[in-house]
Image: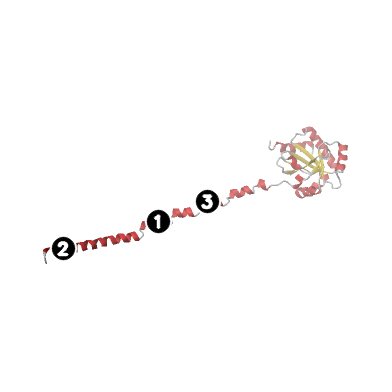
Amino acid sequence: MKKSQFLLSLILWGSLLLSACGASNSAPNAMMDETATPDAMMKEPATPDAMMHDTPTADAMMHDTPTTDAMMEESTPDAMMESPAWFSAALTDTRSDNAFTVNDFKGKVVLVEMMAVWCSTCKQQQDQMKALHEQMGMPDDLVIVSLDIDPNENLDTVKSYLNTTGFDWRYAVAPTDASREIASLYGDQFLNPPSAPMLIVDRDGVAHPLPFGIKTADDRMQSVNMYLKEGM
């Protein structure tokens, strides 16, 4: 073989070897490109942080669900408390013929007497009421109401009674429904005029029954003053 042919053969063999080495080195790199790396695989599953954004947190759920405080605001004792129905019963002032209700005096102290024209005990109690009126001078935040609870008496009956006695505070005739509720709330004895039944409605609209029997002007003044001082 000539020397030139031998050199050519060596060059060709060298080229083939270099090509083979290059192919073997590039194959792993190509496989690495086609196969997901650990970093790439880590990016696909949702991380705990990502899941926290997709799933409502405890704080978020607390905003969506009414709390105990919110539920309490909807039904507080003040919201649930209501005045008795007889507080809103339509009454007529016997002397002036003006309409009124006990609720009209909210914020004041109201002294309510259940009575009847024929009741001599009621007359004695009202004499003491007149003495109380004279001693206190009837302050603006005190209201006295004598409520006739006898179903057989009416406004004309009470007017005739006032013309005889001269008592000058509010008198009215209780509607039947109001009388029934008074008995239901405070006892049947409140519909028995000789028991001298009375109660005080305080500034907040709460009724406080007084002991039965005739109360002197001094006794009644103590009771009235106790409630007049409240809320001042």
41 up-or-down from 151: above or below: below
Observer able to see residue 68: yes
Which residue is outermost to the left? 2
Alpha carbons under labels 1 and 3: distance apart = 27 Å
Q: Position of residue 38 (x, y in %)?
A: 36, 58
Determine which residue is flagged by label 2: 8
Closer to the camera in the image, 61 or 122: 61
Please name the amino acid that badge 1 sits on.
Answer: Lys
Res 144 quadrant in image? top right
Residue 154 lies in quadrant: top right
Residue 61 at x, y = what percent? 53, 52
Q: Position of residue 161 (x, y in %)?
A: 87, 40
Q: Give the mark, 1 or 3, whose residue is nearer the N terminus.
A: 1
Residue bearing mark 3: 60
User: SS class of the residue under badge 3?
Assistant: helix
Q: Residue type at mark 2: give it.
A: Leu
- Dot in front, 1 or 3: 1
Q: CA distance from mark 2 to mark 1?
A: 54 Å
Give the mark count: 3
Q: Which residue is mark 1?
A: 43
Q: Is residue 213 visible?
A: no
In contact (CB < 8 Å): disc 3 and disc 2: no
What amino acid is labelled 3 in the image? Ala
Q: Is residue 92 left or right of residue 20?
A: right
Q: What percent of the width, then of the height, locates residue 75?
A: 64, 49
Decide: few, some or many residues near mark 3? Use Cα within 10 Å; few <14, some 14-19, many ≥20.
few
Q: Residue at x 77, y 49 (%)?
A: 181
Residue occupying image coordinates x 11% and y 63%: 3
How crowded is the residue under tag 1: few (<14 C-alpha within 10 Å), some, or many (20+)?
few
Q: How is the image coloured?
A: secondary structure
